[in-house]
Image (tube, grey):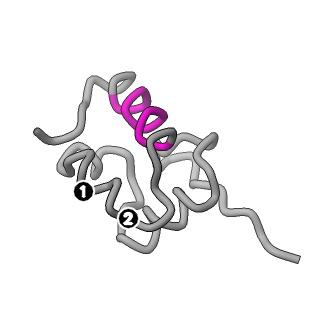
Amino acid sequence: MTTRMVPPADSGLPGKLSQPALRALDHAGFTRLEQLARVKEADLLKLHGMGPKAIVILRQALAAEGLSFAE
């Protein structure tokens, strides 16, 4: 039986991200939403498990906090 990854409540990471996307972020060392504001979308898409749907979810979560991906 596999255990489902759930981002900590204080991380700011959206809980609706797919398991591959959560693992990709975790393996890359991203544990908090605000860390993603220093990263370009294109760089995140290079991570294995990160796809366009995850980028949209993360973009919306960043925008809700007044943040955005790096240019």
Q: Are marks 2 and 1 in contact (CB under 8 Å)?
A: yes
Say whether residue 60 is left or right of residue 46.
right
Question: Which of the 4 image quadrants contains residue 8?
Answer: bottom right
Q: Residue 43: x, y in percent?
A: 24, 56
Q: Residue 16: x, y in percent?
A: 63, 40
Report the Cα–Cα distance between label 2 and label 1: 7 Å
Magenta-colored span:
54-62
Q: Which residue appears at 36% of the width and 70% of the height? A: 28
Q: Residue 37: x, y in percent?
A: 23, 43
Q: Which residue appears at 43% of the width and 31% of the height? A: 61
Q: How many marks?
A: 2
Residue 56 is tagged as: none
What is the crowding at mark 2: few (fewer than 14 residues within 10 Å), some, or many (at least 20)? Answer: some
What is the crowding at mark 1: few (fewer than 14 residues within 10 Å), some, or many (at least 20)? Answer: few
Residue that carries the numbered disc 2 in the rendered image: 47
Residue 43 is tagged as: 1
Of residues 7 and 16, which is closer to you in this image? 16
Seen as rendered, the residue at the extreme right is 1
Of residues 71 and 11, which is closer to you in this image? 71
In terms of secondary structure, what is the magenta stretch mainly? helix
Q: Amino acid at mark 2?
A: Leu
The quadrant in which the C terminus is found is top left
The quadrant in which the N terminus is found is bottom right
Residue 56 belongs to magenta span: yes
Q: Which residue appears at 81% of the width and 74% of the height? A: 2
Say whether residue 24 is left or right of residue 68.
right
